[in-house]
Image (cartoon, rainbow, N blue to C red):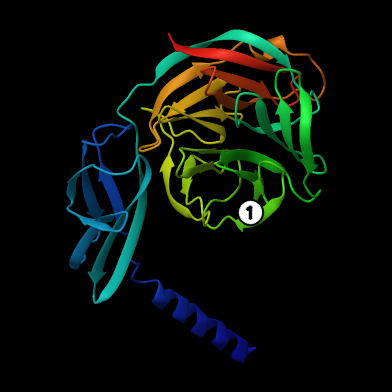
Amino acid sequence: MAKINLLILVLTLTLFSCGTKPNPQYSLEISKSSDFLKNGDKIKLILNNPINEDIKNIKFKINDSLIGSEYILNNKLGINEIEVSFEVNNKTYNLNKDLTIFSSKIPKLYSYRIINEFDHDISSYTQGLEFDDEYNLYESTGQYGYSSLIKIDYKNGLVLDKIFLDKSYFGEGLTIIGDNLYQLTWKQKIGFVYNKNNFELIKSFNYKKSIEGWGLCNDGTNIYKSDGTEKIWILDPETLNELSYISVVTNNKVITKINELEWYRGKIYANTYQFNKEVGLIIDPKSGSVEGVIDFKGLKEKVKKHDKLDVQNGIAFHSKKNTFFVTGKNWNKLFEIEIFEN
């Protein structure tokens, strides 16, 4: 019993002696004039040192670039990382904090006008939609065991070609450059490149930085890929590697769940998934700033109601008609529309 009591006494003294001098509780504070910071705004970085330790070699960084403790923002929109490193008693400390930069632009509001309605396969869980020429519409559909790639004569709904993906893949967005058709899968971190004329598989590619596959579009040179977050990745069309990304933001919100994409006159047009089921976005591909919000309210009300009816998804620009075509997941209609500013 004496040996046990002695052991308890030693442990107690050890624990008590280790806790007599608390570790310093440093913190990084960002002093700002607004909750919705914009580029051009000034911030002040403060390293809090509540017990007045002798701190040396303080360095502030934003996205790994050195800055002063007072700094005028001029950085990528979206989430940026602020870091401070410093030394106390020859020991180096690092603290990190996220800072979000919003767009300086207030999005313009847009509406739509229906020009024509066409039949659409009600069983298609539409994930990607794109025109190749005057008649041929390409569609990627989702759901495990039902995912497919389809070539359609949109005027009469005639299926010109169709292949199914392996049941382990959930099909997502698509885009076309030349004779190459690119298709994503959702969570499997793999995409496919086909010959668009005969759907012959050319190669597959893996996602390296982006977490999932959602939507695709292209500007004729680069490919743009959404991954379910606020990010749209810019891909090299040869290697399919993610070169960089933009973050989609408004003047007061970071927008996640960016879905199907389409390129039109230097802008990215996008569907959103579950953020707002009846809203499309017009996005600046250089900055990620949302320049326009399209109100698609009422469109879903014009399609057949059934148990599997889901959100609007699928937007394709017809270059010869200068109109957009939109549909949704398990919609029985494809709408030709005009989009205009309010």
| Label 1 crowd (10 A; few <14 / some 14-19 / many >=20) | some
In this view, the residue in front, 284 or 156, is 156
**23 above or below 341?**
below
Do we see residue 214 in this rendering? yes
Q: Amino acid at mark 1?
A: Lys
Do we see residue 49 in this rendering? no
Say which quarter of the image contains residue 42: top left
| SS class, disc 1 | loop
Q: Is residue 195 left or right of residue 236?
A: right
Residue depicted at x 53% and y 12%: 338
In this view, the residue in front, 8 or 312, is 312
**201 above or below 102?**
below
Identify residue for label 1. 189
In this view, the residue in front, 206 or 289, is 206
Residue 137 percent location from the top left of the image: 66, 28
Residue 126 percent location from the top left of the image: 70, 31
- Label count reads 1
Residue depicted at x 49% and y 39%: 230
Residue 14 percent location from the top left of the image: 45, 81
Which image quadrant: the N terminus?
Answer: bottom right
